[in-house]
Image (cartoon, rainbow, N blue to C red):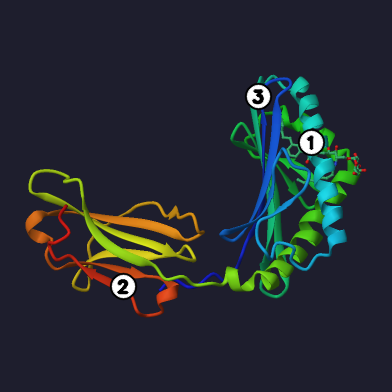
Amino acid sequence: SPAPHLSFPFRGLQISSFANRSWTRTDGLAWLGELQPYTLRNESNTIGFLKPWSRGTFSDQQWEQLQHTFLVYRSSFTRDIWEFVKMLPSDYPLEIQVSGGCELLPRNISESFLRAAFQGKDVLSFQGMSWVSAPDAPPLIEEVIKVLNQDQGTKETVHWLLHDICPELVRGLLQTGKSELEKQVKPEAWLSSGPSPGPGRLLLVCHVSGFYPKPVRVMWMKGEQEEPGTRQGDVMPNVDSTWYLRVTLDVAAGEAAGLSCQVKHSSLGDQDIILYWDGNHVS
Ligand code: ELG
């Protein structure tokens, strides 16, 4: 079965939309592995704790300080962009996405990153102690970088957030959120037939739903052999932070009997789910 998660990357995301000279909004959210502990909506001046364990091991006073840092940043960032727009040839609407975070690695090491995209393309990142432009960023980004690199105070704050706060936050969340992060929820599986792919052909559908965590392996089998025509859909979210997947196989109607769908998931241990196509699934 796929191995259970051992590492939980933390990533904070910022989405800023500038529709025109006066309309803008910035939303923030953060993920730890597959779970979302925080939100910071444009309409709100407080970080929303979405999980009972979101506080981690930080004190109320530390949270007040962090929240203050993000609120100052949000308004400064908006002001900055309005200034930068005057330097750039670009016109509204503008979309800026910033993502940053960290991951704890073995031996007490942690790895951090921060990067930003402009109109959907990477433009800059923070490396060590300074801002650098992305490989094929438009030349004018260099002007933005120059301005950003002159602000020593901000660079120190970014470094502090990435290399001190982030790993410490994650260490706390791994303790307070342990049982939810490491939970194992078994999938249910069922078979159906899909729209016929053509005359004399059947579309066999194997549905797998309700599992956590996300890694799963679902195969159509003939005996011990994987059917090469197996097509995996995308893993889709259910509303309860479990996952759903469908896997299909296009076969000649006469060859469906004896095929089975096999599901491997960490919650099942070695007890794979195996469902046999018995011809009663035709809709
Ligand atoms: N500095 C106030 O990123 C992603 C988390 C970053 C947190 C940075 C927090 C620091 C901050 O808010 C703003 O700085 C003044 O006050 C500070 C103390 O509160 C210090 O004393 C500092 O020295 C002083 O200057 C500062 O205004 C800063 O510029 C805010 C935005 C910085 C920033 N910009 C950014 C821009 C990030 C990603 C992408 C872009 C541009 C993308 C390209 C657009 C065309």
| Category of crowding for the residue at label 2, using alpha-carbon neighbours closer than 10 angstroms: few (below 14), some (14–19), many (at least 20) | some
Image point (74%, 23%), residue name: 85
SS type, badge 1: helix
Ligand 1 falls in quadrant: top right
- Nearer-the-camera pick, 119 or 50: 50
Q: CA distance from mark 3 to mark 2?
A: 50 Å
Which residue is the extreme one toward the right?
153
Mark found first going from the N terminus, 1 or 3: 3
Image point (33%, 68%), residue name: 263
Residue 181 percent location from the top left of the image: 59, 68
Q: Is residue 61 left or right of residue 176?
A: right
Q: In the image, which is nearer the foreground, mark 1 or mark 2? A: 2
Q: CA distance from mark 1 to mark 2?
A: 51 Å
Q: Is residue 76 left or right of residue 207?
A: right
- Nearer-the-camera pick, 157 or 279: 279
Residue type at mark 1 is: Phe
Q: Is residue 66 left or right of residue 249?
A: right
Residue at image mark 2: 273
Residue 235 percent location from the top left of the image: 42, 55
| Category of crowding for the residue at label 3, using alpha-carbon neighbours closer than 10 angstroms: few (below 14), some (14–19), many (at least 20) | some
Residue type at mark 3 is: Ala
The answer to whether the beta carbon of the residue marked 1 is less than 8 Å from any atom of ligand 1 is yes
Residue at image mark 1: 77
Mark found first going from the N terminus, 1 or 2: 1
SS type, badge 2: strand
Which residue is the extreme one toward the bottom?
270
Q: Is residue 9 left or right of residue 127?
A: left
Q: Which mark is residue 184?
A: none
| Category of crowding for the residue at label 1, using alpha-carbon neighbours closer than 10 angstroms: few (below 14), some (14–19), many (at least 20) | some
Residue at image mark 3: 19
